[in-house]
Image (cartoon, helix red, strand yellow):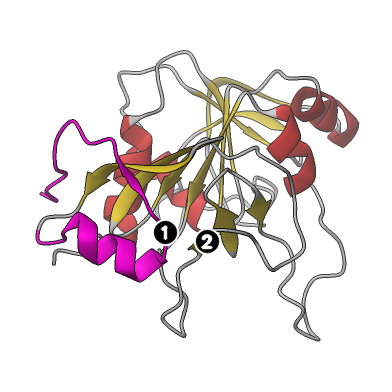
Amino acid sequence: MNRLDREQMAARVARDIPEGAYVNLGIGLPTTVANFLPADKEIFLQSENGLLGMGPAPAKGDEDPELINAGKQPVTLLAGGCYFHHGDSFAMMRGGHLDICVLGAFQVSERGDLANWHTGAADAIPAVGGAMDLAIGAKQVFVMMELLNKSGDSKLVAECTYPLTGLRCVSRVYTDLAVFDLGPDGASVIEMVDGLSLEALRKLTGLVLRDGRASVCIPE
């Protein structure tokens, strides 16, 4: 099967972000989505440390140490972009002013529960942080993750076993093998990579998985 690499996953997420949207890209893999947003679309990227109007990552050598995202990675600021207080940023996140947030995850349940802050490991981060505010505050929550963990177990599950970040908050999951819509009736497959069957995907996840495909996704 033609498994998507991380850049292809980011490009796929970027395709579903409409012009005019206010979007937060979570720490880690989701930040790469910024590099695939079309220059001819006006999309407003917000960072929880107090930025609105972020652009793609800077070219090597052009980094500004005072211009970073919430993951401490260097970013650019587009014309008209602005800085503001951390408290104002969280008011934006909690107040329903973001159209979409894109987050990573350790687990997502088939009905949209999100677990993305703690695995129980001794060296895990001590608190849920801004992911909780994004999960409940954004109008749509997209998750971007590899479908299987390092042990080969599905991260899309019937019920999350890790501590939850938010309940029934994820609407769509983008993975290296398929794209899923989630809801009260469970998960629907809307796209799969070439060479993967629905039955094989069901075996990988252990889920029933409804077939909601309009077409098959074939990586370029």
Residue contact between numbered discs 2 and 1, judged by CB atoms under 8 Å: yes
- In the image, is 206 to the left or to the right of 106? left
**Which is nearer the eye, 210 or 180?**
210
Q: Is residue 157 visible?
A: yes
Residue extending farthest to the top is: 20
- Neighbor class of circle 1 (other Cα within 10 Å; few <14, some 14-19, many 20+) is some
Which callout, 2 or 1, points to the residue nearer the camera? 1
- Neighbor class of circle 2 (other Cα within 10 Å; few <14, some 14-19, many 20+) is some
Q: Which residues, given as a range, are shown in magenta?
A: 195-220
- In the image, is 95 to the left or to the right of 13? right
Asked if 39 appears above or below 143 in the picture, the reply is: above
**Which is nearer the eye, 202 or 77?**
202
- In the image, is 147 to the left or to the right of 142? left
- Tag of residue 158: none
**Which is nearer the eye, 60 or 18?**
18
Q: Is residue 105 visible?
A: no
At 58% from the left edge and 43% from the top edge, which residue is drawn? 112
At 28% from the left edge and 35% from the top edge, which residue is drawn? 212
- Tag of residue 207: 1
Q: Gap between marks 2 and 1, in whole Å?
A: 7 Å
Asked if 112 appears above or below 152 in the picture, the reply is: above
Q: Which residue is mark 2?
A: 157
At 81% from the left edge and 56% from the top edge, which residue is drawn? 128
**In magenta segment, residue 196:** yes
At 35% from the left edge and 18% from the top edge, which residue is drawn? 41
Asked if 124 appears above or below 87 in the picture, the reply is: below
- The secondary structure that most of the magenta stretch takes on is loop
